Amino acid sequence: MRTELTCLPCFTGQIERTLAYAGVNGSTGLRIRRKAERILERSSLDQAPARISTEIHRMIREETGIDPYRQVKESYNRIALDRLPALRKMAEEAVSPRTGRTDLLEGCVRLAIAGNVIDFGIYDRIDLDRSIEESFALPLSPDAYDAFADAVHKAGFVLYLCDNAGEIVFDRVLIETLQAMGRSVTAAVKGVPVINDATRSDAEAAGLTGSLLRVIDNGNDGIGTLLELCSPGFMEAYRSADLIISKGQANYETLAEERDTRIFFLFKVKCPVVAGSLNRPEGDIVLRKGGE
């Protein structure tokens, strides 16, 4: 993934949205916006958009001294938790369009992808019901799903790279299913708040922490997973995993170049640049094996 000129309006939207969530305007907002524009001016397009966004959001947090998305993260953790019983039932009753039979694992995958819509780095408003409906109706690559199911059955240790707060409740359904299948699962979250990405406090709020699930953080504030910034503890888990489930578009942006066949990317296509790189329409759902 490389940054394109069509990414620039998205960067601008992120800046405006983050300043609004931070409650910053006037001369202070103008000064921060100008600093963000200078970051864009000196940034190379020969890198993933997530890397540029990381620098912008780091600067805004440093300038404001707050986590601008804290309240919206807490809100969507509660919204998703209220839906948890219904989400579990959806996964259990999901009928595979390919086979016409119920398939719990496929239902969990589709549900996890549906939750990827909770992304305030891109969206101003979230329609969870529509995202769930689309995720259960749109086709998944049969080859990718078969490869994923095979990898799950062969894996002993699964590393689950979480994406956003709220979304991690949707992930919880898939994680619980993997555990019920006898897999050892470690969930990884961000080490520092960035946009509405999940941190350890969000994992706790979503009920992911506890004796049955190990939760680690990656030690940094990078959007996506920037391996060169990750902590030794995260890298140990990353290197030893049999299967890596990578949630979200930014993780795809930053990890696709690794061409690691242990990785399966699960996300919604949420921008024209990613859509173009995959030759898929915006709004599509993706299950993709690394290295392809």
Image (cartoon, helix red, strand yellow):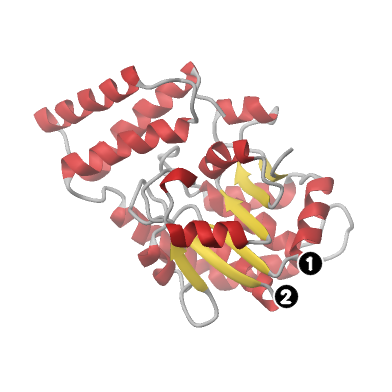
Judge from the rendering whether residue 101 lies leftward or rightward of residue 183; answer left or right: right
Q: Say which residue appears at 83% left-offset and 47% top-offset.
A: 142
Q: Position of residue 174 (x, y in %)?
A: 64, 65
Q: Say which residue appears at 46% left-offset and 62% top-offset.
A: 233
Check the image and report above or below for 102 versus 62.
Answer: below
Quickly name the residue at label 2. 181
- In the rendered structure, find residue 34 and report the number of the disc placed on it: none
Looking at the rendering, which quadrant does residue 252 occupy? Answer: top right
Check the image and report above or below for 235 versus 204.
Answer: above
Judge from the rendering whether residue 157 lies leftward or rightward of residue 211; answer left or right: right
Judge from the rendering whether residue 188 lies leftward or rightward of residue 62; answer left or right: right
- As helix, strand or loop, the secondary structure at mark 2 comes to loop
> Which residue in the rendered view is the most extreme toward the bottom?
211
- In the rendered structure, find residue 153 and report the number of the disc placed on it: 1
Q: Say which residue appears at 68% left-offset and 73% top-offset.
A: 183
The amino acid marked with disc number 2 is Met
Q: Where is residue 81 in the image (x, y as percent from the top left)?
A: 47, 68
Judge from the rendering whether residue 193 lies leftward or rightward of residue 114; answer left or right: left
Tell me how far mark 2 sits from mark 1, CA to CA: 8 Å
CB contact under 8 Å: marks 2 and 1? yes
Between discs 2 and 1, the one toward the N terminus: 1
The amino acid marked with disc number 1 is His
Q: Say which residue appears at 46% left-offset and 24% top-offset.
A: 7
- Do we see residue 125 in this rendering? yes
Looking at the rendering, which quadrant does residue 75 occupy? Answer: bottom left
